[in-house]
């Protein structure tokens, strides 16, 4: 027998005794290590093939490890993305526009009808200074209008007492109680306008403005009672599909208008609805108004109240 074959046969015999099924090379090197060193330690003689195999295993392990690292990293990225998504979602919820609650949808319709009927009944001018209690009385006594229901009153109160900061209106609360009245003795009707102003400072300011600017400037809105502002606000809500966020940018909620305490709006005679648009800022009347030191603009561009630019709204100072 050839010397090499002997070793191989011996190794195979050893392998069969050990019940090993490892590859031949390892079995042979193991056999010799046992033969010459006679201990349990395993000395692996690394021939070229084994080395290659080892390298392949090592590489596979490295690949496996880096694959695991990538998977972990990816799962972290996925987690972060998920939490960012959740964050965005909650931000959107805050930013999301506020609409009339479903439970008030019917009251919204019936209250608007009743307020319009009350305005027709008392007249456009008088409605500007009509109180909440007086409105309830009229509704109750005039059969074609009809008493306000419990649910309608609840709706009216919710519109008056809620906090509009929730939809981005940051103006100051002006009226504390829905039943606050305007004292008829404190107001004066401004002829040919359908509007009232408070006697004293507001009235004097207005007439001084007419004197300084000219007769082409007119009062377009004066004192507004809580009921009047409620009607205007509900009408605005209606035209904005029940969206409080949008409506309040161009009309203060009932308790938040300075019209209740002295501010007023002016316009150019014959300019119609354009008086309540930024086009008013292009009129001679507005340019003349800007030069007056005794008045100011309440809602400037980017005002902190969250109200649109209103060049026509005079802040009485
Ligand atoms: Zn105004």
Image (spheres, rainbow, N blue to C red):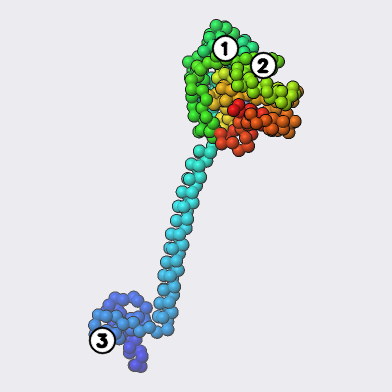
x and y percentages locating residue 244 in the rendered image: 56, 30
Quote the CA–CA distance across marks 2 and 1: 14 Å
**Outermost residue toward the left?**
39
Which label belongs to residue 190?
2
First in residue order: circle 3 vs circle 1: 3
Q: Is residue 63 visible?
A: yes
Q: Nearer the viewer, mark 2 or mark 3?
A: 2
| Dot 2 crowding, Cα within 10 Å, few <14, some 14–19, many 20+ | some
Quote the CA–CA distance across marks 2 and 3: 120 Å
Quote the CA–CA distance across marks 3 and 1: 121 Å
Q: Residue at x 36, y 91 (%)?
A: 4
Q: Residue at x 63, y 19 (%)?
A: 203
In the image shown, does 67 or 130 lie closer to the viewer?
A: 130
In the image shown, does 268 or 20 lie closer to the viewer?
A: 268
Q: Mark 1 sits on what residue?
A: 185
x and y percentages locating residue 103 in the rendered image: 50, 24
State if disc 1 and disc 2 touch (CB < 8 Å).
no
In the image shown, does 241 or 316 lie closer to the viewer?
A: 316
Q: Mark 3 sits on what residue?
A: 37
């Amino acid at each position: 027998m050839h010397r090499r074959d002997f070793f191989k046969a011996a190794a195979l015999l050893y392998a069969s005794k050990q019940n090993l099924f490892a590859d031949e090379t390892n079995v042979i090197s193991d056999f010799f290590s046992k033969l010459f060193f006679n201990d349990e330690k395993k000395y692996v003689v690394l021939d070229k093939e084994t080395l290659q195999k080892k390298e392949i295993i090592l590489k596979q392990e490295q690949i496996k490890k880096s694959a695991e690292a990538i998977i972990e990293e990816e799962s972290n990225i996925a987690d972060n993305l998920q939490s960012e998504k959740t964050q965005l979602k909650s931000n959107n919820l805050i930013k999301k526009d506020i609409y009339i609650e479903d439970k008030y949808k019917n009251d919204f319709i019936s209250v608007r009808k009743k307020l319009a009927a009350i305005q027709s009944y008392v007249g456009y001018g008088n409605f500007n200074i009509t109180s909440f209690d007086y409105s309830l009385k009229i509704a109750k006594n005039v059969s074609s209008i009809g008493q306000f229901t419990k649910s309608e009153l609840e709706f009216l109160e919710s519109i008056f007492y809620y906090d509009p900061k929730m939809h981005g209106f940051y103006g100051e609360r002006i009226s504390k109680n829905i039943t606050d009245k305007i004292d008829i003795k404190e107001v004066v009707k401004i002829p040919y306008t359908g509007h009232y102003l408070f006697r004293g400072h507001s009235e004097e300011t207005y007439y001084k403005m007419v004197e300084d600017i000219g007769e082409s400037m007119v009062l377009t809105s004066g004192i507004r009672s809580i009921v009047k502002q409620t009607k205007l606000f509900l009408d605005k809500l209606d035209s904005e599909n029940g969206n409080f966020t949008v409506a309040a940018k161009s009309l203060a909620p009932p308790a938040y208008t300075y019209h209740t305490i002295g501010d007023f709006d002016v316009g150019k005679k014959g300019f119609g609805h354009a008086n309540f648009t930024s086009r008013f800022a292009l009129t001679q009347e507005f340019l003349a108004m800007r030069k007056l030191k005794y008045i100011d603009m309440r809602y400037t561009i980017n005002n902190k109240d969250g109200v649109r630019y209103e060049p026509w709204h005079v802040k009485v100072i």
